[in-house]
Every structure is written in structure tokens, then in C-alpha cells.
Image (cartoon, rainbow, N blue to C red):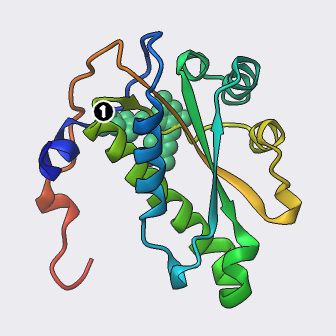
């Protein structure tokens, strides 16, 4: 699929078929996440692959979003604040690690779409609940940023409306 078709076809899909995600496709998605730009090339993020049904159910519970546990694979993207802070101090911990994690998540969503898979970025969750499922020590600088269920789609949502470019884009100044 052409890049712009991938961008146009991506949707937040919240229902998945029981079909497993092939290992080579998962590897491509993870490689895409690993190709994302990052501040200072430090890659201040970790990606946790969750396949265990019990873990997925706890993630669903922590987000209060049941569809997460339906997906064959759930990726949890965690900002590694210490990694970014080693060079960039507070800005690294508070901003760059979060940006690194979220850019990688975007790359993985688009890679999933390009491979005929579906995903939904989940950001509304109880931080401690998600952290404890994947063994992330928040006080140690590992902050969960995104939960990304991935699977074959069992729904075809329409594109949601977007703001007009004339409203969103500004020439020179806000
Ligand atoms: C930072 C972020 C957090 C989100 N959190 C959730 C979420 O917790 N649950 C959910 O169902 N969708 C979530 N979404 C998906 C949005 O609802 C979705 O992207 C938006 O409605 C546009 O629809 P589309 O992705 O199909 O274009 C999130 C998206 C982003 C980028």
C-alpha cells in the first residue's frame, strides 16, 4: 500500500477476529517502532508485547475498555525517562521520552495498517494498573504511554471528520 493510502486507511478499530497475528508481521511492526526518530537518537521508550490472556484482561480492566482483551496481541509502549534524562535532564524525562514513545506508537499503528491489520491507540487507563501488568516501575522512570491492541479487524469504521486545514494551519503566527 502506498504511504498515503496507509495514512488514509488507518482507523481506530475496536473489534478483532480470533485470527492470530503472524510472527513475521509482528516483527515488521516492532521494526517500524524501532525505526522512529527519537530525541538525540536515545530511543527513550520500551515496547512490551503482551500475548497472555490474563495479562490482556488486566490491561482491559485498567483501561476499562473490554476490546483490548479480544486482540491477539497488545503492545504496551512505556517511556523510559532515565534514558532520555541522561543527556537532556528534566526536558528529556518529561518531554522527549514521552514524544519518543508516542512517535514509535504512531509508526507501529501505520505499519499494522500497511500489513492489513487493525489497531486502536488506547491512552485512557489507570497508570498504576497498566504499569503493574507489564512490570514498569513508574517511580523508577518507566511510565506507560500507550496501549495498542493489534489484530485482524472485525469492524470497518468510517473515517471520522477532521478539522479543516484552514482552521488548523496557520501562516507564520497562531
Ligand atoms: C493519545 C490518544 C489516546 C487515545 N485513547 C483512546 C482510548 O483510550 N480508547 C479508545 O477507544 N480510543 C482512543 N484513542 C483513539 C481516538 O479515539 C481516535 O484516534 C479518534 O477518535 C479518531 O478516530 P480514528 O483513529 O479512527 O481516525 C486515542 C487516540 C490517541 C491519539
| The image quarter in which residue 1 lies | top left
Q: Which residue lies furthest to the front in this view?
A: 24
Looking at the picture, does residue 56 appear above or below residue 86? above
Q: Mark 1 points at which residue?
A: 11
Q: Is mark 1 on a helix, strand or loop?
A: loop
How far from the left and from the top, in percent, is residue 57? 71, 19
- In the image, taking residue 101 as reference, residue 111 lies left or right, namely left
- Observer-nearest residue: 6 or 14? 6
In this view, 162 is above or below 97? above
Kindly identify the residue that appears in the image at 40 percent across and 52 percent down: 106
Return the residue found at the far bottom. 87
Along the line of sight, which residue is nearer the eye, 103 or 174?
Answer: 103
**Mark 1 within 8 Å of ligand 1, using the beta carbon:** yes
Q: Where is residue 164 in the image (x, y as percent from the top left)?
A: 14, 52
What's the residue at 66%, 78% (across, down)? 84
Q: How many labels does the image show?
A: 1
Figure quadrant of the C terminus: bottom left
Name the residue rendered at 76%, 59% in the picture: 142
Q: Residues within 10 Å of mark 1 (few under 14, many from 20)?
A: many
Q: Which residue is drawn at 28% across and 30% down?
A: 116
Nearest to the observer: residue 26 or residue 53: 26
Q: Where is residue 51 in the image (x, y as percent from the top left)?
A: 64, 27
Q: In which quarter of the image is ligand 1?
A: top left
Q: In this view, does 116 lie to the left or right of 95?
A: left
Q: In this view, does 18 lie above or below 100?
A: above
x, y (%) of residue 33?
Answer: 46, 56
Front residue of this view, candidates 119 and 157? 119
Amino acid at each position: 500500500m502506498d504511504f498515503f493510502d496507509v495514512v488514509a486507511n488507518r482507523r481506530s478499530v475496536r473489534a478483532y477476529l480470533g485470527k492470530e497475528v503472524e510472527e513475521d508481521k509482528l516483527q515488521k511492526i516492532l521494526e517500524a517502532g524501532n525505526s522512529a526518530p527519537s530525541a538525540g537518537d536515545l530511543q527513550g521508550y520500551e515496547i512490551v508485547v503482551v500475548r497472555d490472556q490474563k495479562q490482556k484482561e488486566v490491561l482491559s480492566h485498567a483501561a476499562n475498555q473490554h476490546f483490548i482483551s479480544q486482540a491477539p496481541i497488545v503492545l504496551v509502549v512505556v517511556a523510559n525517562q532515565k534514558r532520555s534524562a541522561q543527556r537532556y535532564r528534566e526536558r528529556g524525562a518529561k518531554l522527549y521520552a514521552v514524544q519518543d514513545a508516542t512517535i514509535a506508537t504512531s509508526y507501529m499503528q501505520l505499519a499494522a495498517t500497511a500489513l492489513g491489520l487493525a489497531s486502536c491507540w488506547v491512552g485512557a487507563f489507570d497508570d498504576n494498573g497498566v504499569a503493574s501488568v507489564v512490570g514498569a516501575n513508574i517511580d523508577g522512570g518507566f511510565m506507560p504511554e500507550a496501549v495498542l491492541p493489534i489484530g485482524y479487524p472485525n469492524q470497518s469504521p468510517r473515517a471520522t471528520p477532521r478539522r479543516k486545514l484552514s482552521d488548523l494551519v496557520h501562516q507564520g503566527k497562531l
